[in-house]
Amino acid sequence: MSVLVFLLALALGSQAENVHVEAKSLMKKDVANGFPLLVFEAGFAVLEVHIKNDSTDAFSIDLEELQVFSKKGKEIERALPTDIAPKLMKFYTGGATSVHGEAYSGYPRRPTQAEMDRSPTIGTASTVGKVSATKGQEIRALLESFELNSGNVAPGEEAGGYVYLKSKKSGNKLNGGYLQLDAVRGDF
């Protein structure tokens, strides 16, 4: 029985050696166009995760098992889009018109009006002090579209996306940590 456990551990270890995980702590200027930049203002951090499977077996991504640690070894709690969307709602109350292009980072230059018009718009409420119930769903759906998804990465394939963290530190202030996904570690 112990030989079987050893062989299984050896097989999992060799698979993990051929799976590469890279992560980067993002700042506002680093996120993709269309991403709601107010995530950073609401006290969340964003990691961009890229997984490359060079093994001969499929690699399973289970976000429930994902752990993220600071450079001091303290675990950083993961945030879900359902946690973030309600916190962003305070930014979408009051005012009478939609703000076009608020999700465009504009880095390294200011965006043109045409670029801002093509950017996703999550408008503010039409009545001051009130917000539509669908705004939270729109924000959550937008965050989910950028999020790293659970699933399998076939041999020779790659996967990537964002992981959200409950941290007021982001970018260089968060660098030096690592994430653990199954038996694979990725530094950022």
Image: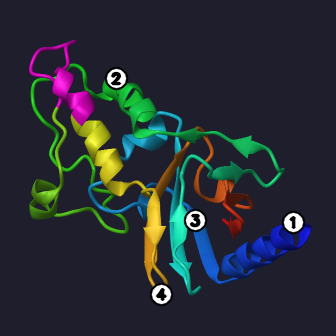
- Magenta segment, which residues? 124-137
Q: Is residue 152 magenta?
A: no
- The amino acid type of the residue labelled 3 equals Lys
Q: Nearer the viewer, residue 48 or 183?
A: 183
Please state which of the two labelled residues, at mark 1 or mark 3, is closer to the viewer: 1
Which of pointers 1 and 2 lies earlier in the amino acid sequence?
1
Label 3, on which residue? 24
- The amino acid type of the residue labelled 1 equals Met
| Secondary-structure class at tag 1 | loop
Residue 90, label in figure = 2
Residue at x 81% of width, y 76% of height: 7
* Classed neighbour count for the residue bearing mark 3: other residues with Cα under 10 Å, few (<14), some (14–19), many (≥20): many
Label 4, on which residue? 156
| Secondary-structure class at tag 4 | loop
Which of pointers 1 and 3 lies earlier in the amino acid sequence?
1
Which of pointers 4 and 2 lies earlier in the amino acid sequence?
2
Between the residue at mark 2 and the residue at mark 3, the CA separation in whole angstroms equals 28 Å
